[in-house]
Image: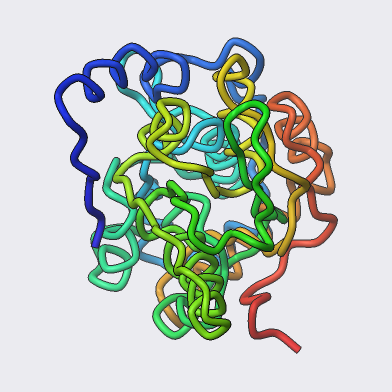
């Protein structure tokens, strides 16, 4: 469950001043914009379930609080490189994308419950999540930490530190609890995990000195540092690289249609063009897979 860390009134007011730097309500000045024109891929369309094909739309659950992957423009509409990719993917399938903005923790239940067709929100594909949904893997992202400028944080030796994170992300559910357990087993202080509803709140907590470090997916941490470069910096390189996956209801043939559409975008160069425009092409893949966390 997502929880928002309560800050004293003075600190909260200061946070509002910083939010503009990493807020999800402003467009990114260095990337994105209009998605490229994309043609329909009839082979991918042929794989669509009949009900989705007949509806003419693809209902996409998204938590638009994770810049530069997915966030909001000034009008409150979702933008980001994931959105550009989602638009292009829908075009390949001959469908109109319909984004439903949601909290991160509600997306997977909404897919299994039939409210959303897919979830496109920087999901890390892991074995636990694959018990509930299938993932079409489209990107490789590592974990990367940030610290206050001049800090000496070592992500591999973080016992006793306070680390800010967006709730229900892989960093909150897997990475930090595992590291904290290792600390306790070694007789050291556990990691104090500060969980925030939105990523920009976690970034601001670090900038305000409420946390010693922040952990997030590598493109997100790098983006936060670029927006708060007078206050925070990277704390080491990215590690534990894992696949992002588009979530689809377990066993649905929609997964194969999504896979074919994304592979078509790779083959015609659109995929790499989108990632390069946003400066996140370091995580590009050559082949679209399904359920990479348990495959092989």
Q: Nearer the viewer, residue 225 or 157?
A: 157
Residue at image point 22% right, 24% down: 12
Residue 38 position in % (x across, y down): 66, 33
- Res. 30 image quadrant: top right
Q: Image point 60% across, 65% down: which residue?
A: 136
Return the x and y of residue 112 as percentages of the image width and height. Answer: 30, 73
Q: Is residue 9 left or right of residue 123?
A: left
The single residue placed furthest to the front in the displayed view is 187
* Left or right, residue 154 beside residue 273: left
Say which quadrant the C terminus sits in.
bottom right
Q: Position of residue 175 (x, y in %)?
A: 54, 67
Q: Quadrant of the N terminus?
A: bottom left
> Toward the viewer: 178 or 212?
212
In the picture as drawn, the residue positioned furthest to the bottom comes out as: 296
Residue 26 is left or right of residue 87, and the answer is: left
Residue 157 lies in quadrant = bottom right
């Amino acid at each position: 469950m997502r929880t928002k860390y309560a800050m004293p009134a003075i600190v909260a007011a200061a946070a509002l001043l910083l939010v503009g730097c990493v807020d999800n309500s402003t467009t990114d000045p260095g990337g994105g914009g209009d998605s490229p024109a994309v043609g329909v891929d009839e082979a991918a369309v042929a794989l669509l379930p009949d009900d989705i094909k007949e509806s003419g739309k693809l209902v996409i659950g998204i938590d638009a609080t994770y810049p530069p992957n997915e966030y909001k423009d000034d009008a409150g509409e979702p933008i980001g490189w994931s959105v550009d990719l989602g638009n292009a993917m829908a075009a390949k399938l001959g469908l109109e994308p319909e984004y439903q903005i949601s909290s991160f923790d509600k997306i997977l239940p909404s897919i299994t419950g039939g409210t959303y067709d897919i979830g496109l929100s920087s999901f890390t594909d892991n074995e636990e999540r694959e018990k509930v949904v299938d993932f079409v893997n489209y990107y490789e992202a590592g974990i990367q930490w940030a610290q206050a400028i001049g800090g000496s944080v070592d992500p591999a030796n973080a016992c006793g530190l306070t680390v800010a994170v967006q709730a229900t992300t892989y960093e909150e559910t897997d990475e930090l609890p595992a590291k904290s357990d290792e600390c306790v087993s070694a007789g050291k202080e556990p990691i104090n995990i500060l969980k925030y509803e939105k990523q920009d709140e976690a970034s601001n907590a670090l900038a305000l000195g409420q946390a010693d470090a922040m952990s997030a997916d590598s493109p997100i941490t790098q983006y936060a540092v670029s927006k708060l470069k007078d206050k925070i910096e990277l704390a080491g390189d990215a590690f534990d690289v894992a696949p992002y996956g588009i979530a689809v209801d377990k066993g649905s043939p929609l997964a194969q249609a999504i896979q074919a559409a994304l592979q078509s975008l790779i083959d015609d160069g659109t995929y790499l063009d989108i990632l390069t425009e946003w400066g996140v092409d370091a995580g590009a893949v050559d082949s679209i897979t399904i359920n990479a966390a348990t495959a092989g």
